[in-house]
Amino acid sequence: MSNKDAHFEKTKSHMIVTLAIWFFFSIVVFMFGESLNSASFLGYPLAYYMTAQGSLAAFIILIFWMSGKQEDIDEEFGFGEREDD
Amino acid sequence: MLKGGFIQNLPKIYGLYTGGFIVFILLMAILESSGVSAKTIGQLFLAFTVLIYALIGWLSRTVQVDAYYVAGREVPTVFNGMATAADWMSGASFVAMAGGIYFGGYIYMAFLVGWTGGYVLVASLLAPYLRKFGCYTVPDFIGTRYGGNFVRFCAVLVLVIASFTYVTAQINATGTIASRFLGIPFEQGVWIGLLSILMCSMLGGMRAVTWTQVAQYIVLIIAYLIPVFWISNKFGFGIIPHFQLGPEVARIAELEAQYGLVKNSADAVKAAGVPGGLASISTAHSAVPAGSAWKYISLAICMMVGTASLPHILMRYFTTPSVKSARKSVAWSLFFIFLLYSSAPMLATLSKISLIDPNLPTGIIGKSISDVQNIEWVRNWIAVKQAYIADFNNDGILQLNEWFMRGDVVVLATPEVAGLPYVISGLVAAGGMAAAMSTADGLILAIANALSHDIYYKIIDPKADVRKRLLAARVLLVVIGALGAYIASMRLTGILGAVAWAFDFAMSGLFFPLVLGVWWKRATREGAIAGILLGLASGTAYLVYVAPAFMNRTPWLQIDNLRFGIIGATVSLVAMVVVSLMTKEPDAATQKMVDDCRVPSGKPVISRQH
């Protein structure tokens, strides 16, 4: 397998992991909205909290983490950008 | 005056600008206390901010193609995040979102998750790869990846339909704000709004829009957050409302149980003479309605996938200096969006509790109707048909289901209800104007650029020189803007449909052709054409089938007119895969192009000047 293919394989698995986490916070959590709401967080009903703030904050952290990790993958295979590009 | 170039000094420049804006707000507060009328303060707010944007637009004028289409690809990560946030948050987000949450409760809040979760798709599936590709517009990617003018034309078609659905609502919002605060008729307000929008974009294209959007973001976020924090602190609900409103949310649920959530029959509402567009509270604030999971999730899916397909957002990531910064910039965009979106439910909570809690001095529910009618803000908003009282049970006491208001009132009137000085209302108007203008600019530019670059330059006249190309771009900008303003001035937006439609159109026609273009080498031109056209056609046909304004049939699986993108995108995916597999594999050059766009290093796939 060429370097490029290996890089893409790793990029692809990273993308799939990212989307799995995304799927959890955008879809799975809200499949159980009714039961989650009986729990509470910061005094808010949990499902209400997730749709008002929780999932939104999770997405931000997820993208920062995803970008950092993808930069590492690019560096690992020598595909990182040079600053003077 | 400043050492180094413009880009190096950005933090300093926008720091000064923010400081200047705060000084201006204080100045207005001083003017207000010295007796200057509310109307003058509103006018000064609008005039001052719009003139600043116009000045930035003029300073950013350019005669270079690269600067006009992609801001010279030198917008730093964080600033691009701010510009994207302004591009994203429309007049509707600013003015209507808190009201939507106020009346729609939990299900409406699917929009919050949908309009933020989509950025994960943008960052992981599209933005860095399109940046590496080096295109000027979204159809430019489709046209180059799949090859051929027809597929390029199809992409332009979806772009125009989706963006135009969206833009009239924005021009409409600028017109509403301009007319309300300048005291001119709505029809004139629309044209003044358009003039302000064009002043930002005409001379400098993407470069000018970028730097005005950053300035507009600063105004709109200050205007949104100050009232939320002020009200929360004034009533002693908490210093940072986002973490401390739990007891108020619980109190609202308690009051809902006490009053009972009554849904008025449409006939009763009509008989009582309630003006159109006004509503009473009939949905629980924080409770999850039984069996509503799919209703919530289907809306969130449409908004997320639609977000990742809207060209005016994707093209913002063409302006960063590198692939790496395009990716990080998505995270920053979402952070800046989060500041406003996470505040909207808090504003809705504050607004609702201050109206319905009889223990608060501002509470009106449970009070005698004749007293309530004498409150100044109630009188003002009833006079302009934005609020209404209908005493259904004739007991002279205001019940929860007898108070009607328009959703926009939540943002526009809450400062007044809570007894904040008028300067805050002027600030909110400037914020709403900034939000509507920045989105309108992004959308009009996306349409005009696609028509000038993809249709005029790539298809009609590939030999056109730079001067002619930029002239065409500017003429189209004015024509598209004028068309949007003309339609907005006819007040057809109610018929043209919700902002949500733009997301559904975009996801029906563009999502899979874009994503598979990067992630599936086997995707062919014929596949892409089938994906775009069949997706768009099936989505539109389904919309006509279910939309109340058209055939009004019973939706399948609760997929109603806000969610028709699910049908369109599914058809698009199936059509694209089937047709791609039936046609010949793309040639070696195309496959190499896809390989190149998957790695950050090396030259852009399309040459820098094209």
Image (cartoon, grey):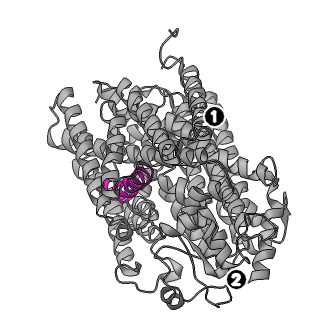
Residue for badge 2:
B397
Residue B237 in sight here: yes
Please, which chain is the residue tagged with disc 1 on? Answer: A
Q: Choose between B158 and B323: the one closer to the eye.
A: B158
Residue for badge 1:
A73
**Splitting the image into 4 quarters, where does residue B581 fall?**
bottom left
In the image, what residue occupies the spot 52% across and 8% down?
Answer: B3
* B140 left or right of B93 in image: left
Amino acid under disc 2: Ile
Residue A18, image x, y percentages: 65, 49
Image: magenta residue range: B157-181
Q: Locate the C terminus of chain B by quadrant.
A: top left
Residue B360, image x, y percentages: 79, 64
Residue B281, image x, y percentages: 64, 76
* B406 left or right of B260 in image: left
In the image, what residue occupies the spot 58% across and 32% down?
Answer: B27
Q: Is residue B179 magenta?
A: yes
Q: Choose between B239 and B358: the one closer to the eye.
A: B358
In the image, what residue occupies the spot 82% across and 68% down?
Answer: B359
Looking at the rendered structure, whether the residues under marks 2 and 1 are on a common chain is answered as no
Amino acid under disc 1: Ile
